[in-house]
Amino acid sequence: MEGDLAVPKIMKTSLTDQIFDYIQGEIVKGTWKPGEKLPSETELAASLGVSRMSLRSAIQRSCAMGLTETRVGEGTFVRNFSLRSYFAELYRLGLLGREPNQINDLRFVLQIGSVRLAMANGIDPVDLLMLERLNSEMERAAANSDQEAFHVADVQFHRAVCELCKNELMFMVYDAVESLLDDVTRKNVQRSVAQADGFKHVLAHHREILESLKANDMDRFVQAMMESRARSLKYY
């Protein structure tokens, strides 16, 4: 009828979606707790009145989302859910962007925000000692041209920077996306070492971060991060 609003058709959800929603809901409610085994496929399919094929598709989806895990010969168990496993799976499946400069920017934003909060609240001297130790480990690894040892200390250094703010939610987000950051951080160092004929840029960058934190100088910290960002843009 002329003048009537066009009403979009409502799409029915698939049976697999409904089963997945049920499994997710029971886990959220605590019916099945972390580490607990779900009923067998035969039992669960019968109780829901669905085919084992539909149930299996829903369980595969819950495993991909990190809610459950299927152990061969044992069954399906509720996982201790973490954002890390969720983001890692999305990254593995190619459902998250793989643009290195965007991932670098995410790391910079999270660390700058964390340090701003940390400086406002007061940085714990014990945390600075930890960063000093990790920086020394990087310097030793660089002196030995050991890129793997350098990478391990580098990742721990930046995790420690993000932990400075003592904000559990902030660090949870950083921890969740670390699977993205790890790969790009490694490539950043490899390309810096290749282009600068050594570790001089990455060593100077980490030393400047440490000194800016010791001085409680936010502007200096941001400058160090932006200079690193400018170099990273050239690597890709």
Image: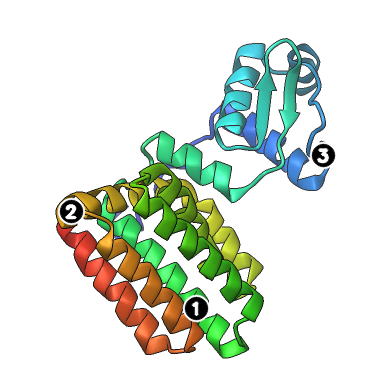
The residue where tag 3 is placed is 33
The reply to whether dot 2 and dot 3 touch (C-beta < 8 Å) is no
User: How dense is the environment of label 1, judged by Cα within 10 Å: few (below 14), some, or many (20 and up)?
Assistant: many
Residue 129: quarter of image: bottom right
- Amino acid type assigned to the residue bearing label 3 in the image: Lys
Q: Earlier in the sequence, mark 1 or mark 2?
A: 1
- Amino acid type assigned to the residue bearing label 2 in the image: Asp
User: How dense is the environment of label 2, judged by Cα within 10 Å: few (below 14), some, or many (20 and up)?
Assistant: few
- The residue drawn where x is 46% and y is 46% is 179
Q: Is residue 195 above or below residue 10?
A: below
- The residue drawn where x is 58% and y is 26% is 16
- Amino acid type assigned to the residue bearing label 1 in the image: Val
The residue where tag 1 is placed is 115
Q: Residue 150: horizontal and vertical position, in percent?
A: 41, 51
Q: Say which element carries label 1.
A: helix
Q: Is residue 154 above or below residue 109?
A: above
Q: CA distance from mark 3 to mark 1?
A: 36 Å
